Amino acid sequence: MTSITTTMKLNHASFPSSDVSATASFFEAHLGCTVAMRGASWLLKRPGFDIVIEDAADHPVEWPHNFHIGFELPTVDDVRALHGQMAAANVVMKTDVFAHERGSRFFCEVPGGVLVEINTRSDADEKYRGTFDW
């Protein structure tokens, strides 16, 4: 790591969707994003970074096997509560909440096909605690 990269932060994530409107609506309804711009691409805002959803309606979107984006919540109870809210809203749930050595988590699918991980590090194994910046 150099002195330049130590000050670097995540600016945005950008990915294609076959249904930009449905993808943006998911991020608004379930992940606390706000839509800042609509057009061929939509810009969604989160504290500290943006999400750009590119229009891919004219071609199929194929994701690599385990490609996903992740969001972190403070506690396991928060993860379970969001899982319940999403399941009740008929979000495509790929897993139930499960314990993992780096913290409990679940996976769901956003309209448009992107896989999302919701996790917490609050119950991570002790050997991983030194790798987190908190």
Image (spheres, rainbow, N blue to C red):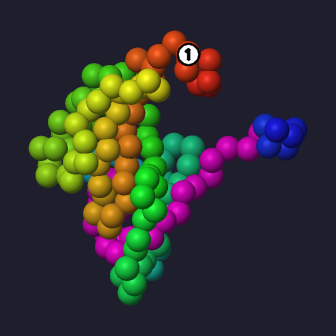
Image-based side of 80 in relation to 49, left or right: left
Q: Identify the residue at horizontal 44%, vertical 34% (top origin).
A: 72
Q: Identify the residue at horizontal 62%, vertical 18% (top origin).
A: 130
Instruction: Please say whether residue 9 is one of the residues in the magenta stretch.
Output: yes
Instruction: Please say whether residue 36 is one of the residues in the magenta stretch.
Output: no
Residue range (magenta)? 7-28
Q: Identify the residue at horizontal 31%, vertical 58% (top origin).
A: 110
Q: Secondary structure at mark 1?
A: helix
- The x, y position of residue 89, in whole percent, is 14, 49
User: What residue is pinned by disc 1?
Assistant: 127
Q: Is residue 41 above or below residue 79?
A: below
- The x, y position of residue 46, in whole percent, is 48, 47
Q: Quadrant of the N terminus?
A: top right
Q: Residue furthest bottom?
A: 58
Q: Quadrant of the C terminus?
A: top right
Q: Amino acid at mark 1?
A: Lys
